Image (cartoon, rainbow, N blue to C red):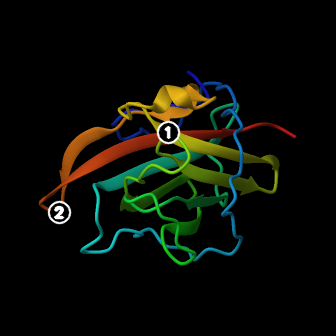
Amino acid sequence: MAGLVAAVVLWPAVTGAQSRDPTPESGIGVWYAPGAPALEELWRPGDAGERLLIRGRVLDTAGAPLAGALVEMWHADAGGQVHPDRFRTGLATGADGRFRVSTVLPGYIWGPRHIHVVVTHPAHPQLVTRLFFKRDPVVQETDRPDLAIILEDGVHQGEPALFADVELVLRRK
């Protein structure tokens, strides 16, 4: 498996963990600000754009889940505007290495739609990367099309939504 995997499945418990390549690095971006609130719900009723639900997990290269990793995410709103107090979170992974975020599909800002991600864990080097979207018609404009994830159409709480499952794999120290 590649370092970044996207498919709409619920993962079984990791028992016979398989090795994985580390997730590729990418630029941190200009709007990083540490200390974002731990919010799973970035989406608010009335937000413009398509609702996006990201289900993720953080693993080491042996395929073992990493509990207590800090996953920081931030992105522009659906119109491509960045707000200092919106669409930002810093979540700790659970014992199974999983996290979940409900947000909106970001708009265009300096190239393809994307979400910035920083993952920190005490036993691994920090990961700085971005998530792009395979269905974005300009995704090939990025220098890292391998970071593009699959979006699946679905329904959440009776409303149309996009779903993505993401693995973020940290290198060993």
Secondary element under disc 2, as helix, strand or loop, is loop
Which residue is drawn at the image coordinates 52% and 58% (left, top)?
Answer: 75
Residue 81: x and y, percent?
A: 47, 64
Q: Amino acid at mark 2?
A: Gln
Compare residues 104 and 152 and report the one nearer the observer.
Answer: 104
Secondary element under disc 1, as helix, strand or loop, is strand
Which residue is drawn at the image coordinates 41% and 39% (left, top)?
Answer: 11
Residue 137: x and y, percent?
A: 37, 30
Q: Quadrant of residue 151?
A: top left
Which label was assigned to residue 100? none
Q: Residue beneath label 2, please?
A: 157
Which label was assigned to residue 132? 1
Which residue is drawn at the image coordinates 42% and 50% (left, top)?
Answer: 55
Of badges 1 and 2, nearer the viewer stands: 1
Residue 121: x and y, percent?
A: 75, 55
Quadrant in which the C terminus is drawn: top right
Residue 100: x and y, percent?
A: 44, 58
Q: Amino acid at mark 1?
A: Phe
Real-space CA distance between mark 1 and mark 2, rounded to the nearest whole angstrom? 25 Å
If you read the primary sequence from the N terminus, does the residue marked by circle 1 or circle 2 appear first? 1
Neighbours of disc 1 within 10 Å: few (<14), some (14-19), many (20+): many
Residue sticking out furthest to the right: 173
Q: In this rendering, does residue 162 appear at all? A: yes
Residue sticking out furthest to the top: 1
Q: In this rendering, does residue 16 appear at all? A: no
Quadrant in which the N terminus is drawn: top right
In the depicted structure, whether residue 116 falls above or below residue 153: below
Compare residues 19 and 84 and report the one nearer the observer.
Answer: 84
Compare residues 130 and 141 and report the one nearer the observer.
Answer: 141
Q: Is residue 107 left or right of residue 46?
A: right
Compare residues 78 and 55 and report the one nearer the observer.
Answer: 78
